[in-house]
């Protein structure tokens, strides 16, 4: 971050020195004001495009607490299975999860059975540990 600030500060200093030099040379030679404004506008346009390109092309770090989408896709977990697993990781019972999601307890058991097979685990604790290791749940 410090490196970027130093680079941008240096570039702005170079631009200011360049503009002051141009201003002095052009005022001495009486070049018309619209051309001077055009040169400044074009310069700042290119500077703005470059800065935006630098800022937008950086990869955003993964937010803390956001699920690891690559691992979810690799495991093939459906959104409902993931939702049920998040509730399991929060410590809810099957009945409590069913009540929160407005589905039957058998649906929750089916989602858990499918999730366990996709995660290659056989219990809630192993599933939670694997999900935490893969950074899918907190």
Image (spheres, grey):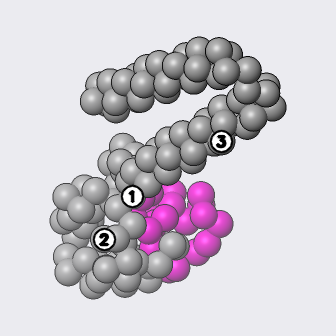
Asked if one can make out residue 28 in the rendered structure from this viewpoint, the answer is yes
Is 66 placed above or below 8 here?
A: below
Give the number of the mark in front: 2 or 3. Answer: 3
Q: CA distance from mark 2 to mark 1?
A: 9 Å
* On-image quarter of the N terminus: top left
Q: Picture coordinates of residue 87 (x, y %)?
A: 44, 57
Residue shown at the point (73%, 20%) measured from the top left: 30
Mark 1: secondary structure: loop
Q: Which residue is mark 3?
A: 42
Mark 3: secondary structure: helix
Is 25 placed above or below 35 here?
A: above
* Label 1 vs 3, first from the N-terminus: 3
Is residue 96 one of those drawn in magenta?
Answer: yes
Q: CA distance from mark 1 to mark 3?
A: 43 Å
Quadrant of the image occupied by residue 128: bottom left
Q: Which mark is residue 6?
A: none
Residues 43 and 82: in front is: 43
Q: Which residue is mark 2?
A: 71
Residue shown at the point (49%, 51%) measured from the top left: 53
Q: Which residue is mark 1?
A: 67
Asked if one can make out residue 122 in the rendered structure from this viewpoint, the answer is no
Q: Are marks 2 and 1 in contact (CB under 8 Å)?
A: yes
């Amino acid at each position: 971050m410090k490196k970027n600030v130093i680079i941008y500060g240096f570039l702005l200093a170079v631009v200011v020195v360049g503009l002051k030099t141009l201003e002095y040379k052009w005022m001495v030679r009486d070049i018309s004001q619209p051309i001077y404004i055009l040169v400044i506008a074009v310069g700042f346009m290119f500077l703005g495009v470059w800065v935006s390109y630098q800022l937008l092309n950086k990869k955003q770090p993964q937010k803390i607490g956001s699920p690891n989408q690559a691992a979810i896709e690799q495991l093939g977990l459906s959104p409902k299975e993931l939702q049920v697993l998040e509730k399991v990781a929060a410590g809810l019972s099957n009945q409590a999860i069913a009540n929160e999601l407005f589905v039957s307890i058998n649906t929750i058991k089916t989602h858990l059975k499918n999730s366990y097979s996709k995660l290659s685990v056989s219990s809630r604790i192993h599933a939670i540990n694997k999900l935490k290791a893969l950074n899918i749940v907190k």
